[in-house]
Every structure is written in C-alpha cells, then in structure tokens.
Image (cartoon, helix red, strand yellow):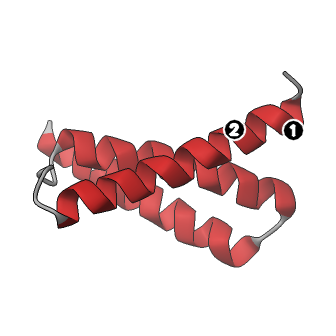
Amino acid sequence: MTKARLIDALGWYGTGAILTAYALSSFGWLEQGRAYQLLNATGAFGVGLVCWKRKTWQAFWLEAVWGAVALVALVRML
C-alpha cells in the first residue's frame, strides 16, 4: 500500500469512527465513555491527517481540537 493510499484509508477510518460515535451516542446505544472518546480521538487523527496532507487548515484545526478534547476526556476518565 502506498503512503497516499494509507493516508486516505486512515481518513476514511476517521470519518467512519466519528460518525459511528455520534450516531451510537445520539441513539442512546453508547454512553459517552471510553469507547466514545476513543472513537472520537482516533477518528480526529485520521481525518486530521488527510487535512494536513491536503493543507485544508480550517478542517485540520477542527480535527486537532476535536481530538484534543477527546484525549483530555480519556485522561480524566482514568
């Protein structure tokens, strides 16, 4: 797998992870606990990586903050 394809795959994973966390939480199937925050943190990393590579700075900073919030929440849960 080429580097570009790997980055695209991580971006698609990120999109899926964030949407999955949001949907499961919205329908009451997942509490906003560790799994929810882990999906958000890893999802933000994947999407943020694509944004960094393509120099989409507004979306990159959205994902950077999204991921940071999720990481802080995870640390506070420990």
Does 48 appear above or below 78?
Answer: below
Query: Which x, y percent locates residue 54?
Result: 85, 61
- Identified by mark 1, the residue type is Ala
**Is disc 1 in contact with disc 2, using a CB cutoff of under 8 Å?**
no
Query: Which x, y percent locates residue 41?
Result: 42, 48
Residue lying furthest top in this view? 1
Query: Which x, y percent locates residue 24?
Result: 23, 54
Residue at disc 1, secondary structure: helix
Residue 4: image tag: 1
Judging depth in this view, the residue of 16 and 7 nearest the camera is: 16
Label 1 crowd bin: few (<14), some (14–19), many (20+), radius 10 Å: few
Residue at disc 2, secondary structure: helix
The residue drawn where x is 69% and y is 38% is: 9
Dot placed on the residue nearer the N-terminal end, 1 or 2? 1
The residue drawn where x is 62% and y is 47% is: 12
Does 35 appear above or below 3?
Answer: below
Label 2 crowd bin: few (<14), some (14–19), many (20+), radius 10 Å: some
Q: Quadrant of the C terminus?
A: top left
Q: Which residue is mark 2?
A: 9
Q: Is residue 14 left or right of residue 18?
A: right
